[in-house]
Amino acid sequence: MTDRPNDHSLEKYRRMQRIRTFESEAEAIHAAGEIPGALHTYSGQEGSGVGCCMALRTDDYMVGTHRSHGHPIAKGAALRPLMAELLGKATGVCKGKGGSMHLSDFSVGSLGETSIVGSGVPVAAGAALGSKLQGVDRVTLCFFGDGATNEGAFHEGMNLAAIWKLPVVFVCENNGYAVSTPASVTVPVKDVAERAKAYGMPAVIVDGQDVDAVEAVVADAVLRARTGGGPTLVETKTYRYGEHAVNMGRILLDRGSELDEWRQRDPITLYRAKLIAQGVEAATLDAIEQEVVTEVADALEFARQSPYPDVTEAFDDVFVDRLPIPDYINS
Amino acid sequence: MAKATYLDAIRLAQQEEMMRDNRVFIMGEDIVCNVFGTTTGFVELFGTERVRDTPISENGFMGAGAGAAMVGMRPIIDTTLSSFLYPAMDQIISIIAKSRYIYGGQAQLPLVIRSCMFYGNSNAAQHSDRPYPMFMNMPGLKIIAPSTAYDMKGLLKAAIRENDPVMCFEDSTCWTSKDELPDAPDFIIPLGKGDIKREGSDVSIIGVAGAVQLALKAAKQLAAQGISAEVVDPRTLAPLDMPLILQSVRKTGRAIIVDPAHQVCSAASEISATIVEQAFDALRAPVLRVTTAQTHMPFSPLIEKSLYPTVDRIMAAAHKLVTGRPAVDA
């Protein structure tokens, strides 16, 4: 970490902008009916995802959640296959079989963005076990929300990682809500981080709106994991601006002035101000924003021009070998 | 070659594959202590990194197996009793069965989930399950249910070499059965290939797992009564070798499926429906299922044992189909 802005700082800014711009475009075309199914936006949490991923090596692993748009972009995934996936196209990163909840790009180290809450935690422990058995120094980082910490899978996975001293960093992106239910009524401790005590695991709480702060604590945890020190639980205090999923208005609680207060601490706005205060030209940041807008427009154009998958694609990737196609398909 | 038991076959298959490929490791509850004798000597051979005791966290270690497989390991996950698969259902279904598909082929999950069906031993309803039909209903899982030591060795070795997830259901009623086991390192039985265990011409008896042994006993007694029964062992339940089953049924014109699972949506139900759909013209009688009653397994031994398929029930079904009359008393 350095206090002086450099290419690494600008890359953090770029990736946060990419997530925000990608998602605002996705929301617009979802409203227009171009994206089928649900859309779970990450907007507001960019400092958390980018801070975490920028502390990882490209070959480190990452496991994520149904709120899956931010993680791959934070880890450096190309935008075209992600946007094509949202549109259900054959060129999508999951060939159109995953969609908004599963934007997982294995080429940047992802091992899935899973939509069963908490289910990624044991998988991350297992990936870390794999690295340990292989004698390689790859670290696995696992994202989940506050809601996941009430799942048995969370506790079982944390326990396995602790007893086996696995090279894994657990990151609870605490946005305060499990769908509509506030963490205050479902979590009996003030901070999720307290739960690490039960597993003898170090834990740290960090401001998720401060990308540099997140990167710093995750970098410490990654170093501990990589050098045989075992797992860490990091809790990033953050906030999602949107509903659990777009258009779930009927179940959204009245959040009062909370949303406005969090918007005052927007991770991108804060980071822009910090970089400018450190001497980065506003024009440099404006140029990055423009490049990102162009990049997202290109991804959308690519997605729109791409073909939908052939119906026979439904029978591929169940197993290594394609399944037989039933007679009623294409008849 | 020496005669070895079904349990020996499990041990030997694992041992040979762990020697052959250092990506293979085994984990589960009480693996080191080795309750059933399927990992005898493994700690000395492979060490406790590759022979790994787990906490009683079925969902946790199932998911850990999935994660390890995704990064290039080839775990064998020993779930002890098949009843313990239920706490791990989330990982088996939502992660293991579905990850390759959801991510468009990016994920590879070469792993084996072993579990024993420990029924008929007065262990009551929570420890006596034969749950393979639930998993047959789920795409993305291959399922083997060997009925002999020979098949177990060949199929389990094949399962460990598969690049797809495989569930291995081990029938405790077969534990002590013995076979000559080939010791060729590459002896494998490909998944999806059934086996004719006994040839016959009057009726096809399709047995699932331990029911194959019952079917063979029934066939022997039926022969003395003038009924020639063919015994078909699918060996793999997903994918099912329907061509072999249909070929047999087309020859005999009659079919009985014997399945230790509960009847509703059982393997017997699936096989029966497919026979009726695809070989109706060849049938000379209705297809019959001999399964376990749709009630729970009670503790008290006499009432428990009365619920499973038996040699007598198979013979009665065969007589009904072939002669139209009840079985003659032997």
Image: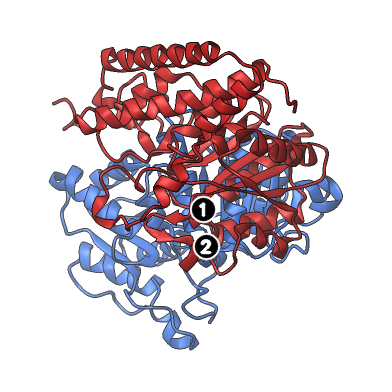
Task: Judge whether B189 appears above or below A172 on screen.
Answer: above
Q: Nearer the viewer, residue B126 or A304?
A: A304
**Tint applied to chain A in the drawing:** red
Q: Is residue B39 above or below residue B56?
A: above
Dot 2, how many residues are within 10 Å of its Cα: few (below 14), some (14-19), or many (20+)?
Answer: some
Image x and y of residue A187, in percent: 53, 65
Chain letter for the blue part: B
The quadrant of the picture occupied by the N terminus of chain A is top right
- Disc number at residue A239? none
Front-most of residues B20 and B26 = B26
Label 2 and label 1: CA atoms lie apart by 8 Å
Circle on res. A150: 2
**Amino acid type at mark 1:** Gly
Residue B294 against residue B109 in the figure, above or below = below
| Mark 2 residue element | helix
User: Do callouts 2 and 1 mark residues in contact (Cβ within 8 Å)?
Assistant: yes
Residue closest to the eye, A78 or B237: A78
According to the picture, the residue beneath numbered tag 1 turns out to be: A118
Total numbered labels:
2
Q: Which of labels 2 and 1 is toward the front?
A: 2
Residue under the image location 46 percent in, 17 percent down: A289
Q: Amino acid at mark 2?
A: Asn
Label 1's element? loop
Q: Percent from the top left, x then y, of residue A263? A: 44, 41
Image coordinates for residue A269, horizontal then vertical, percent:
50, 30
Residue A328 drawn above or below residue B170? above
If you read the primary sequence from the N terminus, does the residue marked by circle 2 or circle 1 appear first? 1
